Amino acid sequence: MTPGIFYPFKRHIHRVAHKRGAQTCLVAVTPVRRHETGIAGTEFIPQSSTIDMPVPSVLLFLKSPVPGYVKTRLARDVGDSAACAVFCSLVERQVAALPPGWPVEIHFAPAEAEDRIRAWIHGADRYLPQVEGDLGARLSAASANAFRRGTEPVFLIGADCPDLDSEDFYAALDSLTSGCDAVFGPARDGGYYLLALKRHAPELFRQIPWSTSEVLKQSLDRAKQAGLQTALLNVKEDIDDISSLRRSRPVLADLLLGNRGVKQKSL
């Protein structure tokens, strides 16, 4: 696991704290190449059952790093620029923590953000705009297209979880190779931070109450109805608002709230 606050947030906090009133997150974005920066800890050795399996593809869903467009719930308490800095740091940490050698697809929004995303996250195998529709439609379309290209298995993730590391990807892969059809990474808020699929399962994306505490429960119910064997990883925090940030990184939350208070008093 990454020790302390998630990598590499100190750089972003410093820049946001000294650029009051910034209307763009470009000052907080540093180009990142996959695996160019090491993460502290011991390298995880995958189980023997995963060694001879096809290499999975990771489908990473991102928004363009623009204040007011990302982490809007967190922004209510810490401001747009600081929330954008949190988002940027989460994304960079997640990219660095992906399993080496696994193909990566960046699924971005909005569609016109491709140049900015490519300039920020280097080295992905594909850069694809997300389709229109709710989260279920976007996840389903990306999954279906990946399997149609012959990719298997497929891992779908965002970048909200500051503790999702390569060990979790290998654990999910081991569950798939042991007979499971789908593996969920449960988030503490009732959603999920990872979904690993052996085959496309459109049932998992239809009529789900996204952004509620019922997401994981109803997804598991749909999987059971479809006859899918499922497994769960460890529960982890997704950072969406100040409460989840406090639970995950309390020192960082206090720092952001302190900076916010100082700015408000100075106005």
Image (spheres, helix red, strand yellow):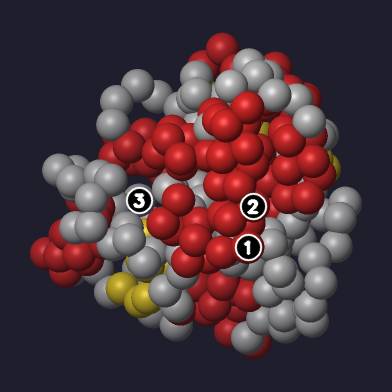
**Residue 13 at x, y percent in the picture:** 73, 43
Q: Is residue 145 above or below residue 4?
A: above
Q: Residue furthest left?
A: 225
Is 133 placed left or right of 99 in the picture? left
Counting residues from the start of the chain, the first of labels 1 and 3 encountered is 3
Residue receiving disc 1: 251
**Gap between marks 3 and 2 measured at Cα:** 42 Å
**Residue 185 at x, y percent in the picture:** 42, 67
Marks 1, 3: nearer the viewer? 1
Q: Residue furthest bottom?
A: 48
Q: Nearer the viewer, residue 55 or 71?
A: 71
Query: Badge 2, how many Cα within 10 Å: few under 14, some, many 20+?
Result: few
Residue receiving disc 2: 255
The answer to whether marks 3 and 2 mark residues whose Cβ atoms lie closer than 8 Å is no
Instruction: Identify the amino acid type marked 3.
Output: His
Considering the numbered disc 2 on the image, is that residue within a helix, a strand or a loop? helix
Counting every numbered tag in the picture gives 3
Counting residues from the start of the chain, the first of labels 3 and 2 encountered is 3
Question: From this viewpoint, is residue 48 visible?
Answer: yes
Q: Nearer the viewer, residue 179 or 24?
A: 24
**Gap between marks 2 and 1 measured at Cα:** 6 Å
Q: Is residue 63 above or below residue 39?
A: above
**Residue 100 at x, y percent in the picture:** 76, 61
The answer to whether marks 2 and 1 mark residues whose Cβ atoms lie closer than 8 Å is yes
Residue receiving disc 3: 200
Considering the numbered disc 3 on the image, is that residue within a helix, a strand or a loop? loop
